[in-house]
Amino acid sequence: MDHELWRTMQEPDIDSRLAAGLRSNRSFAEWWVGRILPTVKLGELVEIRPNYAREEESWFAQSKAGRETDLHVVAKNVHGVHYAILTESKVIAPPSENQPEDYAAYARWGELQGRWRQGTTVLMAPKGYLDRASSAGKYEVKLSYEEVRDSAEANGLNDLASYLDAGIARHGHSGPARNPDELIGGFRVRYSDLLREEHRHLYECLSGNNKKLFDSSQRWFEFHPRRCRLGRVTVPGVEVIHKICNRTKGDQDRSFQQNMAVHVPQTGCYENCPPNWNGRDRWRKSKAFWILDMPLNADDWLFFDDFSADAARRVWARMSELIIEE
């Protein structure tokens, strides 16, 4: 086992490997279906889709926001009856708003549409997550990484087992931090995992090594979208920065003003003067950019030892007004 894999793995890495294991290993597939639907004798798996965007138009007509199913599986029993297993996988990220309820609504929608006789919602996560997460009881089945890992090992799916082990290790490192790297690393995982689930267009332009950095000197998140909307003008090459703190080591200064900043390259029409947006006198000049710092309300400040999903959502909503979704 790669004992450092927990630092770089992402939850979607598990989803794709789990899907591959279900496709390639009949014994593992029978265990999976039997664990979740004990009365169903597996005939075949007719759909296996990791990170599945629910694209059906009639579903979107009933849903306020498109959701992703981490692992969408439709199994057919020996009598040809279809069953859906809709799995949400978690490592440490908090649940998105109304996420379990939306899974349940999608399961029922498929039943009404005749796509499957029964849809079952599953939360798959490390045992420690399942024991503590308040949302866990809203899923019909709870499935631990530990038991999936054991079955994967028994069936020779060693790559899947290694990633599940890494997910368990990452969860184990998400408690009280023992050093600055762990503190900031855990915070960045929560930040980027929730961002991926709720604002995919922002996540895609988030910079960093696999969207997550474990360097204690990191103090902000950089977004590199193709275009930004500054008033009536669309500008390419802009960087949007979510500034969390000014520390490089030691305790975070909880009185430090947190900002969202816009960096506009000093090129083209902005070579000699900043954009005429939010007041030109508010922009300052760096070596390569015009920079505008926009203060965040104190309620929207984030701290490495206390990640607030609601505060992050408010900041991301403000970013979404600037960053144009491709």
Image (tube, rainbow, N blue to C red):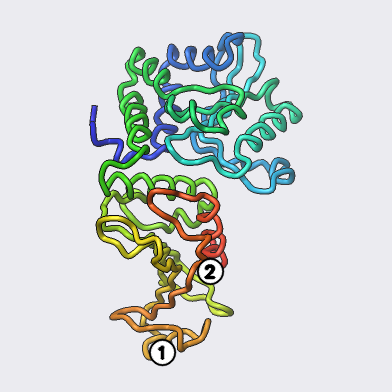
- Residue at 57 percent across and 22 percent down: it is 141
Vertical comparison of 140 with 166: above or below: above
- Residue at 31 percent across and 51 percent down: it is 213
Residue 156's tag is none
Based on the displayed image, in which of its 4 quarters is residue 158 positioned? top left
Residue placed most toward the observer, 306 or 206:
306
- Residue at 53 percent across and 60 percent down: it is 299
x and y, in percent, of residue 21 in the image: 41, 23
Say if mark 1 contacts mark 2, CB within 8 Å: no
Amino acid type at mark 2: Leu
Mark 1, residue position: 273
Q: Which of marks 1 and 2 is nearer the N terminus?
A: 1
Asked if one can make out residue 49 in the rendered structure from this viewpoint, the answer is no
Mark 2, residue position: 322
x and y, in percent, of residue 52 in the image: 54, 38
Give left or right: position of 2 versus 326.
Answer: left
Residue farthest bottom in this picture: 272
Vertical comparison of 99 with 74: above or below: below
x and y, in percent, of residue 48 in the image: 52, 28
Vertical comparison of 320 with 74: above or below: below
Based on the displayed image, in which of its 4 quarters is residue 113 positioned? top right
Amino acid type at mark 1: Cys
Asked if one can make out residue 258 in the rendered structure from this viewpoint, the answer is yes
- Residue at 47 percent across and 60 percent down: it is 301
Numbered disc 2: secondary structure? loop
Residue placed most toward the observer, 36 or 131:
131
Give left or right: position of 92 versus 166.
Answer: right
The crowding category of the residue bearing disc 2, from other C-alpha atoms within 10 Å (few below 14, some 14 to 19, many at least 20), is: some
Residue placed most toward the observer, 168 or 61:
168
Numbered disc 1: secondary structure? loop
